[in-house]
Amino acid sequence: MVNWSALPDVGAVCLLAGAFASVARRNQTHVSKIWLTGWLMIALHFAASLFQTAPGAWGILDNIVLIGALTCAGLLFMWASVPYRQEPSSRSMLFALLAANTFYIGLLAVGPVPAWALNVGAALFGLLPLSVALSTAKKFAGGLRWTVIGIYCSLSIFLIVFQQRPGNGTELAVNAVLFTVYLGCCIHFWLAYRRGTAGAFITIAGFAAWACVFLVAPFLQFMFSSVHVEGEVWNLPKYVAAVGMILLLLEDQIEHNKHLALHDHLTGLPNRRLYQDRLASALERARRFEAQTALLVIDLDSFKEVNDTLGHHVGDMVLQKVAVLFSSRVRRSDTVARTGGDEFSVILEEPTSRAEAAHVGKSLMQLLSEPLQLGEHSVLIGASVGIAVFPEDAREMEALCIAADLRMYDAKHLSHDKHEQESPRPPRAVARLEPRPRAGLQVVD
């Protein structure tokens, strides 16, 4: 027999899942895929509610799908917000919780089972995640993981005490399992999205209300059995959480678009637009405090040979490697930007001086004095650097940039002329590029 009264809820959640899928498709992240899978499980849960009154084995199977899909969705939501979910032990923890929930829900759905079997199922909620945590404690340990273990150990104790209570023991057990799952979602999202946005607030509030449903509903039924609450009321937190999660995806997409607009897509460094904003701000602070700011412009000497000999994919690898090396050598308060095809710029803020800027320039060049290991290729490149210091060399941003550029080109020409006098032009190599000897180790300031 089909429960047609649940059909509007099925239609509503399917439309909501479709909207979520549309947003998630434009936000191609690992989290969005897991969330979409979770909402498909929620849709399966509502679909199973249509056949909740089916007799015999079909009714047992439907109950397993009904509760199991809702539980699995919550565990997926919870796991997706774990910051270290790529850790193998995190996947093991997810499988442990899925196994414990599936086994216990199956026991409840089958019907009367021996007390020892229920006790074993209840104990697995605590034992399985605890065993995963203890077996991987030397490799990884986190406060969030032990919070989850504490919650599920508490669930084990509660189930052992109340699951065989006459009359409503099974109902209490089911509600306790679902309450624990969605309380875990609330905690995980609260820790993962600590930001004052509408999406974060609505999602956390939705999961908190969703968890409370499994407390308030049985309490009202026990204390005020004559009070009837429509099923749609208990489903509202699901829709609230769904709307919040869609907002989170949209917020993340907006932040990602802002990042792309201000950062180089290949290296992740600030692009010319953000570099100019930061340079303008640095110069304004220098004027206010009567301090110095240094600008370094660095050009890779043999980058064209890399592209021509080994291909553009190796050239991209060179740029990425250089970006990492340069970023690791300067202070966090300084800025490394990619301002051209093979050009990088560094803004050194106070405290700095011309001597310190020259020292930084030489140290950055030393990073390129050894071959870069790029997979099967060993690439040796050189670079030239030009330094301009505010306010000695220029007092305006454009003039400062021009001064640094001119000195960088002077360094490049000095290196080239010296190389032409000392040796003939080296032939192109297939896997190893040999640039001019010590090419680019000229610092012109």
Image (spheres, grey):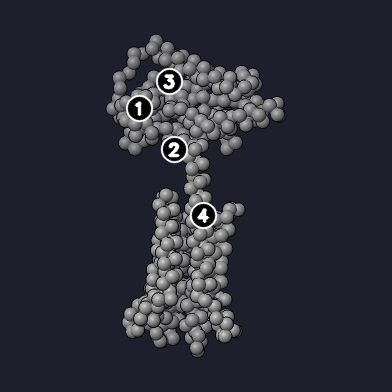
| Rendered residue at 43%/84% (across/down) | 116
Mark 2 sits on what residue? 265
Between circles 1 and 4, the one closer to the viewer is 4
Q: Looking at the image, tell me whether mark 2 or mark 4 is earlier in sequence order.
A: 4
Q: Looking at the image, tell me whether mark 2 or mark 3 is earlier in sequence order.
A: 2
**Residue 175 at x, y = what percent?**
50, 76
Q: Are marks 3 and 4 in contact (CB under 8 Å)?
A: no
Mark 4: which amino acid? Leu
Between circles 2 and 3, the one closer to the viewer is 2
286 or 90: nearer the viewer: 286
From the image, which quarter does the N terminus lie in?
A: bottom left
Q: CA distance from mark 2 to mark 4?
A: 25 Å
Q: Are marks 2 and 3 in contact (CB under 8 Å)?
A: no
Between circles 2 and 4, the one closer to the viewer is 4
Q: Are marks 1 and 4 in contact (CB under 8 Å)?
A: no
11 or 251: nearer the viewer: 11
Mark 2: which amino acid? His
Residue 164, numbered circle: none
Q: CA distance from mark 1 to mark 3?
A: 15 Å
Residue 247, numbered circle: 4
Between circles 1 and 3, the one closer to the viewer is 1
Q: Residues within 10 Å of mark 1 (few under 14, many from 20)?
A: many
Residue 439, numbered circle: 3
| Rendered residue at 39%/30% (across/down) | 371
Q: Residues within 10 Å of mark 3 (few under 14, many from 20)?
A: many
Mark 1: which amino acid? Val
Q: Looking at the image, tell me whether mark 3 or mark 4 is earlier in sequence order.
A: 4
Q: CA distance from mark 1 to mark 4?
A: 44 Å
Q: Secondary structure at mark 3?
A: loop
| Rendered residue at 48%/17% (across/down) | 409
